[in-house]
Amino acid sequence: MNDDLLKILLEQNDYNNLLYHYTSFKTGVEGILSQRKLKFSSLSRTNDPFESMRSYPITVWTNENEKDWISKSSTGIEAIKILYDKIRIACFCKDNVINVIKEKHQGYNINDFNPIYYRGWAKLRMWIQYAESNNGFCFIFDKDKLLIKIEQYLKDTFDFAKEDILIDDINYDDNLLDYLDANIVNADKKDDPKTGKERIIKYARGYIFTKIRDFIHEQEIRIAIYLDQFTRGEELYIPYCDSLIGVIIGCKFPHVYLPSVEGLVNRLSIKLFEIDWDAHLGPQLSNIRKK
């Protein structure tokens, strides 16, 4: 894919195996490129208060046996309270051209918009919000290769099961019903999850993959890892190896640092691009270094 990556990125099409990760200049240079690792953060580090600020669980009970209720509900509540300490996530954007084209055909002239804006690398708000006002990076990963590297690292490092890795698109919903369901302990139900791992398997969409519709422009896809060995606040850094296939620098990237970035990219044998924004043509990509 490396030889044809620029051509692929400029197509008005979706590539479901590409993941795009926006970040600042400092994190991109000192972390991802220099350390050759991708950080998985706790939910408490996210910008969304529904995720970063823990909700106190709600207990549902109709049984008349008070002692039984106290025992069951306490177990469930404790599982929820410690659950967020055990989850680490990495966030990416995805391509969304096809869905948008289908929507536009429902009442808009297809010539009234540029589909390239719905590629994962061409999201101006993401460049502004996450890539330090166009001074940072967008990293391009091969999803299949990245998942293989993650699984191998966890297998070599932790007491790990394959189901501990979760990947899914974010569901955008202002009602947050999945989120609310995930935080309810039903003491009457025998199958109500008792441990953090049981809860995350049953309610992953509520805990990890639901956000309000105000975030819908991000078209986010997440990789989440659940491990009992995690402690609160601990970060997880995983080598990405050959899953990183391209790097895009922002249109305001400080070019005085470009030689250093080129050196880091050279050692990884990947493509380096620069994005520019044209009022008529939309976002444009150009090769900085031909491989």
Image: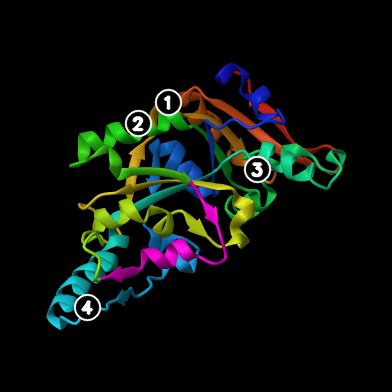
Cβ atoms at labels 4 and 1 below 8 Å apart? no
How far apart are the alpha carbons under marks 2 and 1? Answer: 9 Å
How far apart are the alpha carbons under marks 3 and 4? Answer: 59 Å
How far apart are the alpha carbons under marks 1 and 3? Answer: 23 Å
How far apart are the alpha carbons under marks 2 and 4? Answer: 48 Å
| Quadrant of the drawing holding the C terminus | top right
Q: Would you place residue 171 above or below residue 148 in this image?
A: below
Residue at image location 42% in from the left, 28% down from the top: 145
Dot 3: what SS? loop
Q: Which residue is mark 2?
A: 149
Q: Earlier in the sequence, mark 2 or mark 1?
A: 2
Residue 140 in picture, x, y percent from top left: 54, 34
| Quadrant of the drawing holding the N terminus | top right
Type of amino acid under label 4: Asn
Type of amino acid under label 1: Asp
Horizontal side of 144 relative to 155 (left or right) equals right
Residue density around tag 1, few if under 14, some if 14–19, many if 20 or more, within 10 Å: some
Horizontal side of 248 relative to 166 (left or right) equals right
Span highlighted in magenta in the image: 169-186
Q: Earlier in the sequence, mark 1 or mark 3?
A: 1
Q: Which residue is mark 4?
A: 63
Q: Which residue is mark 1?
A: 242
How far apart are the alpha carbons under marks 3 and 2? Answer: 27 Å
**Residue most extreme to the left:** 67
Q: Which residue is mark 3?
A: 250
Q: Earlier in the sequence, mark 2 or mark 4?
A: 4
Identify which residue, 93 or 111, lies in the foreground. 111
Residue 175 in picture, x, y percent from top left: 54, 67
Q: Is residue 147 magenta?
A: no
Dot 2: what SS? helix
Q: Earlier in the sequence, mark 3 or mark 4?
A: 4
